[in-house]
Every structure is written in C-alpha cells, then in structure tokens.
Image (spheres, rainbow, N blue to C red):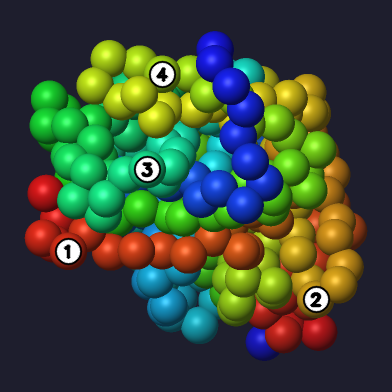
Amino acid sequence: MTAITMPSPISGCASETADFVGQQIKDCLNMLQKSNALGFAAKGTFQQLDEVFEECSSEGWDGERAKPISVEVLQCTRRFLSLFPLGIEAPEIGAEPDGSITLEWYRSPNKVVSISINPDDWVYWAALIGASRRHGADYSLMGISDDLLRTILQVTGGN
Amino acid sequence: MTGSVAPDELLARYITSSKWLHKQDQTVKQDAFIPPNSELSVTRHLGLTEEAIWKIGKKIVESTPRSLHGRADVETSNVIAQRLNVVPQPVDGNPNHANIINWPPDKDARKMCALEIASVADFVANPEGKV
C-alpha cells in the first residue's frame, strides 16, 4: 500500500483565514484517520494502546521489576502515531519492562522493526531484515524520519 | 554471585504478558528481553526438571494479577554473542536465578540485542494454560 503524506496543520499563524485552513486540515486528517483503508484509528491501534496502558501502568506489571508506563509516554505515543503518513499498515502495540511503549511491524523473526517510545520524547528503533541490522534514535516531535519510514515499508512490503 | 554460566546452558525468560507474543506465530517479541534497568532476570535450566522450571514461573506470578503464558528458552551462547554476560544471582525460592548484564547504554542498541535474542528464542507454552 502506498503511504500518503498530508500537510501538517498550520500553527503559529494569527489570521482568521490561517486558523480556518488549519482547522480544516485537522478535521480532514481526523476523518482520514478513521477510514478503514488509511487510518490507524479504524484499525484499532488506539484501542490497543489504551489496553496496553491499562495493563502496564503499575509498578512490576510483569510480575517482576517492570517500570510503569506513564501518562506522558501514552500521550507521546498518541502524538507520534498521528504523525504517520496515511496508508501505513497498523503496528502491534506492546510494552517493555523499562516503561516504554512499543510499535512493531512483524513478518517473521528475521523481518521485523520495533520502535520504543520513551518518557524522554525520543523514539528508539531497531530492525532485523534478513542479514541487515539497523537501529537509531529520532526525536518524536520531529515526526517519522525517512530512514525509519523506509525501514517500516521494507518490512511490510510497502515499497 | 556464584560460579559461571556455561555457553550451552539454557535460560528461561518467563512470559507474563500476552503482549509479548506475536499473534501470528506465537514467537516472542523483543519487548520481553528489554531489561527494566541494567539487568534482565532469567532462570537457568541447569539441573531442573520441567516441573521445577514451571513451578518457579508460577511463583513469580502468584502474588500478582499476571498470568504465566509460557517461557522463552534461549541458549546462553546467543546472549553472549550480543556481548552481554549472564551471571548467576540466586534469590529466595529460585537458586537458579541469573541476570543478563552488560547492556549497552543506548536504548536503540539494547533493542538490537533484544531483537537478536528474541529471533532465536523458543517459546514454550505453559502446559496448564494461563496460570
């Protein structure tokens, strides 16, 4: 499936026209997020996210020493998910014992990419694709880096 | 800390969250192998019967609302191959407890190690179902 990049909502503009256009773009993006074909919302991703938060928001949620998922990490994940281009396959949501939420695209043990959203607003990712190993870090508010997006599409077969 | 762990020893990581398993093929996600801090708890198979291995897992979840879905078995050599170490750290009720240590400081490098370990781990479902 082809990923579709939409323009970011306009921010920092003072005029009524700019506000109007910005709101229209936001409404349009929200509508597209709810579409079965394009958005994460209709694919149950945000519901999965809430379930993971509920399950993993207390100390020792793994029966051992796991750190709780914080509200900040939950919010950061929501924001990060909303930055994905439309049409990307929905990830599986999970949690790590260090208090991070994970987004994962998986085909097999040797074709997988996993992203961690951490309390510090950074996202860390690693991928195994055949003999290739890649990993890196991105600042979540800057959106999805080209490198990471290419890696996801390589795993899902979207390119 | 006592003794050392042989490269051919099997280590068990208990799977206490269904979210740590891939729905498609019941393999284990890297999430299960990310340490909460600088060390990751595992249990050595050494000298234990299957029954004894499961008993330890059940003990871990008995005082929590968690379920024991199974365990991920991985050979120590696969952990060492990631430049990590396994050190015995017996605890009350689990003399075979050990820690995986020497994790790289950068989270993305940790994830890479965890992905590699998960890719060779064998999931063994709890024979009693979820406990």
In the image, what residue type sits under mark 4? Answer: Pro
Visible residue check, residue B18: yes
Mark earlier in primary sequence (4, 3) = 3
In the image, what residue type sits under mark 2? Answer: Gly
At numbered mark 2, what does the secondary structure look like: helix, strand or loop?
loop
Q: Do pointers 1 and 3 mark residues of a single chain?
A: yes
Foreground label between 1 and 3:
3
Q: Do pointers 3 and 2 mark residues of a single chain?
A: no
Q: Which mark is residue B91?
A: none
Chain hosting mark 3: B
Q: Which mark is residue A130?
A: 2
Q: Which mark is residue B47?
A: 3
Q: Nearer the viewer, residue B10 or A82?
A: B10
Between the C-alphas of marks 3 and 2, the distance is: 36 Å
- Judged left or right of residue B126, residue B72 is right
Callout 2 environment at 10 Å: few (<14), some (14 to 19), or many (20+)? few
Query: Which residue, given by chain and number where applicable, does mark 1 sit on?
Result: B127
Pointer 4 with pointer 3, Cβ within 8 A: no
In the image, what residue type sits under mark 3? Answer: Gly
Pointer 1 with pointer 4, Cβ within 8 A: no
Mark earlier in primary sequence (1, 3) = 3
Callout 1 environment at 10 Å: few (<14), some (14 to 19), or many (20+)? few
Between the C-alphas of marks 1 and 4, the distance is: 25 Å
Identify the residue shown where x is 43% and y is 55%: B72
Mark earlier in primary sequence (1, 4) = 4
Residue A79 vertical position relative to residue A108 in the rendered view, above or below: above
Which quarter of the picture shows residue B118? Answer: bottom right
Query: Which residue, given by chain and number where applicable, does mark 4 sit on?
Result: B90
